[in-house]
Amino acid sequence: MGNIQYTTEKAKRDYLLLRKALDFNDQRAYAELMGLYRDSIYYLMMKIVKNSDDAEDLTQETFGKAFRNLHAYSPQYAFSTWLYRIAVNNSIDYIRHKNNSPQCIDDDLFSITAEQMIDRSQATHSTTPEDVVIDKQRNAMLRSAVQQLPEKYRKVVELRYYDELSYEEISEALNISLSNVKIQLLRAKNMLSQIVGKIRYAI
């Protein structure tokens, strides 16, 4: 354990809890790990399957699979990244089984000034009541636009801008190359720009 280079305090905390769970079957360590990430995994599952019961089942399955395979975890990557990858794979398997066909969404392009809209909506500044209303409208517009993206691109956008994962973490979570992450985000921004433009025009 002494040779491990922790990138963040969070990574160190997670790994120490993981070792307690794995080495000593410490149930409190298992419970703490689940408590730290349960809500974010459940929220991710809800965004993908859009059904609370299925999202709950997939969340439980994700932690069950992760805890059964802790011995396979490598501290080279963040525990959260590893957990997200298990969750995403679970959701893909679920959707494929539900639709009885593989999901193939390849050549659609994505979009915005997502960064600009998200940066503005998350910016800390003194707000007036008008600012609050505008921010709510902007967030609602952006959420609506993101939901219209093809699933594979929506996942990349949500992991990057809402779950705040790095490119490397997204690459690991989705099991795609780093260059593919960047290409998909670029395409997503292009598509989001078009969608947001249509929403504004409709309004």
Image (cartoon, rainbow, N blue to C red):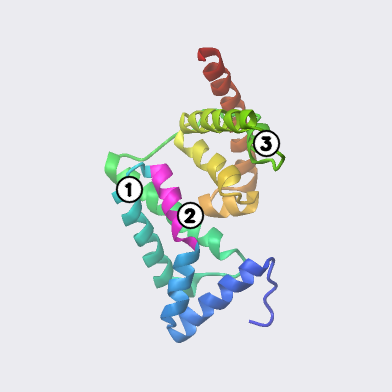
Residue under numbered circle 3 = 127
Q: Label 1 amino acid?
A: Ser
* Tag 1 residue: 52
Q: Position of residue 122 (x, y in %)?
A: 64, 41
Residue 100 figure quarter: top left
- The kind of residue on which mark 3 rests is Thr
The residue under the point 50% across, 82% down is 20
Q: Helix, strand, or loop for circle 3?
A: loop
Sequence-wise, the earlier of marks 2 and 1 is: 2
The secondary structure that most of the magenta stretch takes on is helix
Alpha carbon separation for disc pair 2 and 3: 28 Å
Give the residue type at disc 2.
Ser
Residue at mark 2 to residue at mark 1: CA–CA distance: 14 Å
Q: Is label 2 in a helix, a strand or a loop? A: helix
The residue segment tinted magenta is 37-48
- Residue on which the image places disc 2: 40
